[in-house]
Image (tube, helix red, strand yellow):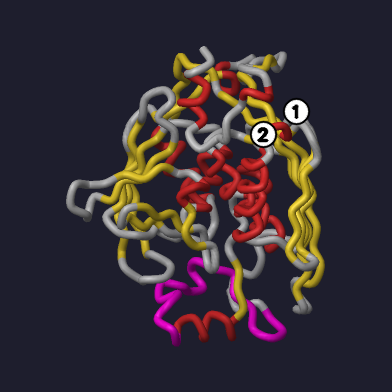
Amino acid sequence: MNNIFSHQNTLCREVRCEGVALHSGANVRMVLRPAPCDHGIRFRRTDLSGRPTIAASFHQVVDTRLATSLGADGILISTVEHLMAALAGLRIDNVLIELDGPEVPILDGSAAPFLEVLRDAGQRSQSALRKVIKVQRPILVREGDAYIKAYPSDQFRVRYSIDFPHPLVGRQEYTFSLTDSTFHREIAKARTFGFLKDVQRLQSMGLARGGSLENALVFDDYNVLNQDGFRFADECVRHKILDFLGDLTLAGMPIAGYFEVHKAGHSLHHQFLRELNKRPTSYNVYAATSIPVPLFPVTAVPAFVDPYQAIAKHL
């Protein structure tokens, strides 16, 4: 198997970008730095005393109402999902992300600009094997008529459906399998979307100050307001897959499973990770080799709060 798939990966060099924060409207500068094996993805707030860091972990999720936000010990990092999806799409495991504010810049509302930045940095294979969480038994989480169903699979594959009462959105469904090229081609360019009345309400509350037609697909009651229209006819559901992949990356390892998702959002995505974490017999952790070999028995797998530490205890 190619090392880019079987071994952990990091960046070749540090890269920088800056842009507007979606909710504060402030300009944010971001630096992405290479990191050693088993470091994982971590954020650092360079504007705070002591330059504290926080792990990109679902255990640190503190808010999912408008985006995925991480927080601990006075640190807050919001709107992480698009960057996390780009890292997952390129299979980058170890990186330190420095920010001089509490939000990841929204850029154009998709993951495509993050892919460009990460590709500019280049990526290199590291000595340690990648670890993969593999769904072993079916799991269901539900909230009203929204649900996530997970089944065993050797790869990440999702069938996602949405249903909005808008003539240009309506019911959309898309099936996606993550490979070395599909994320860039099928998902990365899909922008976040919203409805004008909701945007106006949020802005009246002092939120979404950085939101504009430059970084979101916006609908009024009947039309899309962006002059360039859609990037895909089903751009909305593709963006939901982008969010789903980014949110699941907070598990700390790639997840291999087949998912059926309907009308979900950040809250249900994270509810799924919490439910999976409660059921250690429903998943296993494997070395990412061509023939999956368990790193340790399923009954010995602890909750994957810090998966690399857990693995180290069994090596």
User: Along the polypeptide, which appears first: circle 2 or circle 1?
Assistant: 1
Q: Residue at x 81, y 67 (%)?
A: 171
Q: Is residue 37 left or right of residue 137?
A: left
Q: Main secondary structure of the magenta part?
A: loop
Q: Is residue 37 above or below residue 119?
A: above
Q: Residue at x 36, y 45 (%)?
A: 54
Q: Is residue 83 above or below residue 202?
A: above
Label 2: which residue?
280
| Residue 3 point in image, percent of width and height | 56, 17
| Residue 167 point in image, percent of width and height | 78, 78
**Residue type marked 2:** Pro
Is residue 233 visible to the viewer in this orientation of the structure?
Answer: no
Task: State which quarter of the image contains the N terminus.
Answer: top right
Check residue 21 for magenta coloring. Answer: no
**Residue type marked 1:** Asp
Q: Is residue 94 left or right of residue 252?
A: left
| Residue 79 point in image, percent of width and height | 46, 59
Q: Residue at x 47, y 20 (%)?
A: 125
- Mark 2 crowd level (few <14, some 14–19, many ≥20, 10 Å Cα): some
Comparing labels 2 and 1, the label whose residue is closer to the camera: 2
SS state under label 2: helix
Total numbered circles: 2
Label 1: which residue?
154
Q: Which residues are magenta?
A: 204-223
**Tag 2–tag 1 contact (CB < 8 Å):** no
